[in-house]
Image (cartoon, rainbow, N blue to C red):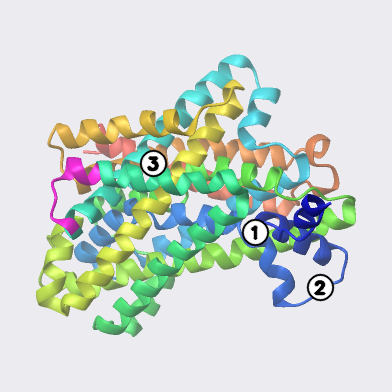
Amino acid sequence: MNEAISQAVVPPTLTEQTCFDIGETLAGRRRGVRAMLPFAGPAVVASIAYMDPGNFATNIQAGASYGYALLWVVAVANLVAMLFQSLSAKLGLVTGRNLAELCRASLPRRCVLTMWGISEIAAMATDLAEFVGGAIGVSLLTRLPMMPSMLITAAVTYGLLQFEKRGFRPLELAIAALVGVIGLSYLAELLIAPVHWAAVAKHTFTPSMPDRNALTIAVGIIGATVMPHVLFLHSGLTQHRVKPRNDGERAKLLRFSNIEVVVALGVAGLINMAMVIMASSAFHAGHAEIASIETAWRTLTPLLGGAAAGLFLAALIASGVSSSVVGTMAGQMIMQGFVGFHVPVWARRLVTMVPAFVVVACGVDATRALVLSQVVLSIALPVPMIALVWFTSSEKLMGRYRNRRFTTAAAVAGAVAVLGLNGVLLWQVTGSGV
């Protein structure tokens, strides 16, 4: 009897409360902003991949070398990201399966194995950027060598991943808090840096490409903004989070999902633009040669003061740790979806850390490795982009929720643009364009 009473008064977990609140909203008993908050989560988690240390590396180079000239690339890449993340979320909500699972179920075996291989390479490149970036931040903060800093980063990342055992909500809130740290840090940076706002407005809406190296950085920005692994991840985050009971509830879920994508990735886009603006304002006039995160941090103190350098470091560590968590989640989902068996978190974490340790042990410049990893991601990006457009345009798979013609046309245009940029980059890298 006493045991039954004690069980009855146990408060619900965060995940259980979130599921209850979502049900209340879908039933029409909650309205306004309060009704939308429980739906926030999947796009917030996905958005951290758009603010990872790879973004720091490419955005610092873009701002230091070319001022505000490449801001339009960040803006366009973010719009493409919004479109494809909304398609990924829709795929999971409508089908109840994630992108990797649908590829395995629908495509020929050879095609599936090829896509899995490319996606695994992309996941490793992602984790290289995120893990090394977080370790750089820890190293700068603690003044420890990179190897011990990488071990610290690995331990913190693994600790955060344990939140998943308590349901989806605690990890979503932890990631949201780290997004807040990054956003507030860069908001403060903009208040400190001498920004030329008229030039910011001009270059946000006026495309330009100063030279060939700018094109390489632009492709890196795209690779750091529109992320292959997170296109797989978002469909997995939505597939089981809420089970709609009818088409009316499914339509509401899709509407709330699209709102969340626009808000979460809108914030991520503004943070990315703030990175370029800060680098341009601080470095372009007299320190255009700055290309590494470490040099940028050391140079900020004499240029803008210790507060600016401290904020930069806080944002970098928050970015590295949180994006490593998201990268591991995505890697698990990709492997499980394509090959159909469960991978323990510790095993996945160990596998994805190996390339990062090899890079550091070989003495490769960490920031250069970050930028090149983003180029690899951009080259791998068309695989999930094409698959997403194909599946979400299928009436057999999506029914009434298949893409409209305008949506399909916009998605195809985005995929073609990325493919075109990748082709130009490869032409340059191989020397054919000389």
Q: Is residue 146 magenta?
A: yes
Please give the name of the residue rendered at 70% of the width and 43% of the height, measured from the top-left corner. 239
Foreground label between 3 and 2: 2
Range shown magenta? 142-150
Residue that label 3 marks? 126
Up the image or down, 192 lies above or below 373; here it is: below
Q: Is residue 351 magenta?
A: no
Q: Position of residue 237 (x, y in %)?
A: 63, 46
Please give the name of the residue rendered at 15% of the width and 43% of the height, measured from the top-left corner. 365
Up the image or down, 169 lies above or below 346; here it is: below
Residue that label 1 marks? 14
- Which kind of residue does numbered mark 3 sit on? Thr
Quarter of the C terminus within the rendering: top left
Residue that label 2 marks? 30
Count residues near mark 1 (Cα–Cα under 10 Å), then give few for <14, some for 14-19, many for 20+. Answer: some
Label 2, secondary structure: give it.
Answer: loop
Count residues near mark 2 (Cα–Cα under 10 Å), then give few for <14, some for 14-19, many for 20+. Answer: some
Observer able to see residue 325: yes
Q: Earlier in the sequence, mark 3 or mark 2?
A: 2
Cα distance between the residues tagged 3 and 2: 39 Å
Foreground label between 1 and 3: 1
